[in-house]
Image: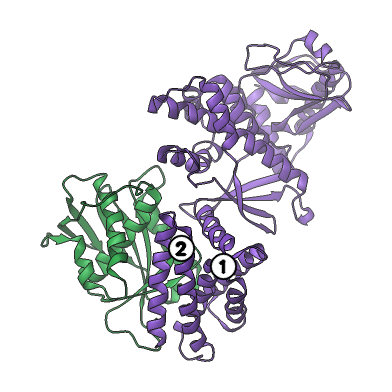
């Protein structure tokens, strides 16, 4: 199914809980990753949301300094966060994101309505995010999705409402699968 | 200020701290982490006794512990860790708090700046690390593995990894058309910079993760840093964990010179040998499943490794000199008072005293270790044969005798054990009609 055109910067207006600087930072990493494979800052993008495929033209801003943005792991990681935010907030209408600090990064949980002021992590949807620049040997989109499901299954988050969002920048495609 | 507002300030500053560190502004990074830690601590304190406000209570206590750690406030971090370990029920959060506690213990006594920088570095290493497990072949000391086994694994692994790195550096220079007055010297220098770092370790078998340095050091380009920081994972994926199928062996022979094959793969065969007192496994980074490194077979060795042969005269000389050979060039490159040496003895004929010679379908490579204290040790992993003697010919005669004795024993045994069935499989490949030998 083909839908109307989107721009990655739409997330700036849709998300509450992150600063504009933060969202721009993730978007820029996504742009660097997408620019490796797609010309003129746009591409026919496939979003597979819980089994439903959507194809839409997606644009992004590439007019910024890319000096110091060469590490592939960061492109896949931060770029993956940007596309996951896009799916949750632009395509699925989640409006609030809550973050918390963990060992090597940040946990993200989404809510559709204003959070409960005291218990602001309650009734949130936990997201496990991953990004791949391109598939290589066993490092495939399917394996990555499988691995993320297993990762949630192993922990106590298996009881929470959760999803996996994995992006493959070369295609480009972002898949969201509900874990629970 | 409400806890939700305090928390918002904390996460915004944590983001700024990460960005500052990425941009190389270390002082800024610590300043932002300090602000983040102070605000998250205030928010978390509000929830200490609010048992009904889960999951926010547990998540904020964990977040406060990590932000304090990243700001270099060890004692503050410990306060949230200890409280969390006693009062939080979520198993994932508890395991993350244990990890934070381990880092607190490791960094105690260091300055605030050292702690903050180190924590980020350790996490960076862990993200790029490979988790290996060494366990004893037979549980002589429970599941504990000996220091000797760890040393043996580590020596062989490092030797092989470094040889692989050297080869990849040569490729890198030719792809980039980088001019080096002396490529071999430059490759040698790169070889020395590759030092896998232990990023984590735990007892219960011996579990440890290792990673390559990823920091851009003075004068290093982005491409060079990418080569050095990914070398360990590439080595693991392309070489160390690979099954040695015929196609794979063919690919290796096309990719590497015989000298490189000797240096990269000989140590791997040592690790995979039946003789080692340990078994190696690792966690696959994609499937997150534990995989065992398979034992090597004689056929793989014969097909891949260049034979390090020595002739009879040289065997005689071994008692006074040590000789190293490169590939099959048979060039003596070093002579010194003999301590130890290792070479191969290919044999297509088994000549045991009192028996007709047995012609094998394919040669076996007998591994020979010379040690000036005990003499020659001849071994053949596939059949777990090993003999030692101070005289080479005596050792060889004993080896053949053991070979025939094993063959006869298998012929006489009605029900073979699992290990014996493995031996029989090897023997039927080597000898057309083994039943005829009584």
Whether residue A94 is visible here, answered yes or no, is yes
Secondary element under disc 1, as helix, strand or loop, is loop
- Using the image, name the chain to which the residue with label 2 belongs: B
Whether residue A166 is visible here, answered yes or no, is no
Q: B244 or B115, which lies in front?
A: B115
Q: A97 or A180, which lies in front?
A: A97
Q: CA distance from mark 1 to mark 2?
A: 11 Å
The picture places residue B197, in percent across and down from the top left corner, at: 60, 47
Q: Residues within 10 Å of mark 1 (few under 14, many from 20)?
A: many
Which quadrant of the figure contains the N terminus of chain A?
A: bottom left
Q: B234 or A139, which lies in front?
A: B234
Q: Is residue B202 above or below residue B273?
A: below
Q: Are marks 1 and 2 in contact (CB under 8 Å)?
A: no
Circle nearer the N terminus (1, 2): 2
**Residue at x-position 62% and y-position 34%:** B268
Q: Residues within 10 Å of mark 2 (few under 14, many from 20)?
A: many
Q: Which residue is mark 2?
A: B29
Q: Which quadrant of the figure has residue A150?
A: bottom left
**Residue at x-position 48% and y-position 26%:** B170
- Mark 1 and mark 2 on one chain: yes
The picture places residue B180, in percent across and down from the top left corner, at: 47, 22
Residue B72, label in figure: 1
Q: Is residue B123 left or right of residue B205?
A: left
Q: Which quadrant of the figure has residue B369?
A: top right
Chain seen in green: A
Chain seen in purple: B
């Amino acid at each position: 199914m083909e839908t109307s055109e989107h721009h990655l910067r739409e997330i700036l207006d849709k998300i509450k809980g992150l600063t504009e600087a933060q969202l721009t930072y993730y978007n820029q990493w996504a742009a660097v990753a997408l620019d490796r494979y797609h010309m003129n800052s746009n591409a026919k993008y496939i979003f597979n949301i819980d089994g439903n495929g959507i194809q839409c033209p997606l644009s992004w801003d590439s007019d910024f300094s890319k000096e110091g943005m060469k590490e592939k792991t960061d492109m896949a990681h931060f770029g993956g966060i940007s596309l996951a935010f896009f799916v949750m907030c632009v395509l699925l209408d989640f409006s609030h994101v809550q973050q918390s600090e963990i060992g090597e990064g940040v946990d993200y949980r989404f809510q559709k309505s204003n959070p409960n002021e005291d218990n602001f992590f309650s009734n949130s949807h936990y997201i496990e995010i991953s990004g791949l620049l391109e598939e290589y040997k066993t490092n495939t989109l399917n394996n990555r999705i499988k691995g993320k499901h297993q990762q949630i299954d192993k922990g106590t988050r298996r009881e929470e409402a959760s999803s996996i969002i994995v992006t493959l920048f070369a295609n480009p495609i972002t898949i969201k699968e509900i874990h629970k | 200020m409400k806890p939700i507002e305090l928390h918002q300030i904390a996460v915004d500053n944590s983001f700024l701290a990460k960005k500052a560190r990425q941009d190389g502004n270390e002082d800024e990074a610590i300043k932002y982490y300090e602000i983040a830690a102070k605000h998250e601590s205030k928010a978390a304190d509000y929830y200490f006794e609010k048992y009904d406000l889960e999951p926010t209570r547990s998540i904020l206590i964990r977040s406060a512990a990590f932000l304090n750690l990243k700001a270099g406030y060890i004692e503050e971090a410990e306060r949230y860790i200890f409280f969390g370990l006693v009062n939080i029920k979520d198993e994932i959060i508890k395991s993350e708090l244990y990890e934070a506690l381990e880092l607190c213990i490791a960094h105690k006594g260091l300055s605030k700046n050292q702690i903050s920088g180190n924590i980020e570095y350790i996490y960076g290493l862990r993200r790029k690390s490979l988790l290996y497990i060494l366990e004893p072949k037979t549980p002589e000391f429970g599941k504990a593995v000996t220091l000797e086994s760890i040393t043996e694994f580590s020596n062989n692994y490092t030797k092989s990894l470094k040889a692989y790195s050297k080869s990849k550096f040569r490729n890198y220079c030719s792809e980039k058309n980088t001019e080096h007055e002396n490529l071999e010297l430059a490759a040698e220098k790169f070889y020395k910079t590759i030092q896998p770092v232990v990023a984590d370790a735990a007892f219960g078998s011996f579990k440890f993760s290792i990673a390559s340095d990823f920091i851009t050091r003075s004068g290093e380009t982005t491409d060079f840093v990418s080569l050095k920081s990914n070398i360990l994972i590439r080595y693991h994926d392309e070489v160390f964990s690979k099954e040695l199928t015929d196609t794979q062996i063919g690919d290796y022979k096309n990719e590497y010179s015989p000298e490189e094959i000797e240096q990269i793969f000989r140590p791997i065969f040592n690790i995979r040998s039946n003789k080692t007192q340990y078994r190696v496994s690792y966690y696959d980074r994609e499937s997150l499943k534990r995989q065992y490194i398979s034992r090597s077979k004689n056929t793989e060795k014969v097909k891949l490794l260049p034979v390090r042969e020595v002739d009879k005269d040289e065997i005689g000389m071994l008692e006074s000199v040590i000789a190293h050979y490169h590939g099959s060039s048979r060039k003596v490159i070093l002579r010194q008072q003999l301590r130890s040496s290792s070479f191969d003895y290919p044999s297509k004929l088994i000549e045991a005293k009192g028996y007709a010679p047995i012609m094998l379908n394919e040669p076996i490579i007998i591994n020979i270790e010379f040690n000036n204290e005990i003499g020659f040790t001849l071994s053949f992993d596939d059949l777990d044969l090993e003999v030692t003697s101070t005289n080479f010919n005596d050792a060889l005669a004993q080896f053949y005798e053991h070979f025939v004795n094993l063959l006869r024993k298998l012929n006489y045994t009605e029900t073979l054990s699992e290990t014996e069935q493995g031996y029989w499989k090897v023997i039927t490949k080597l000898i057309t009609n083994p039943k005829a030998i009584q």
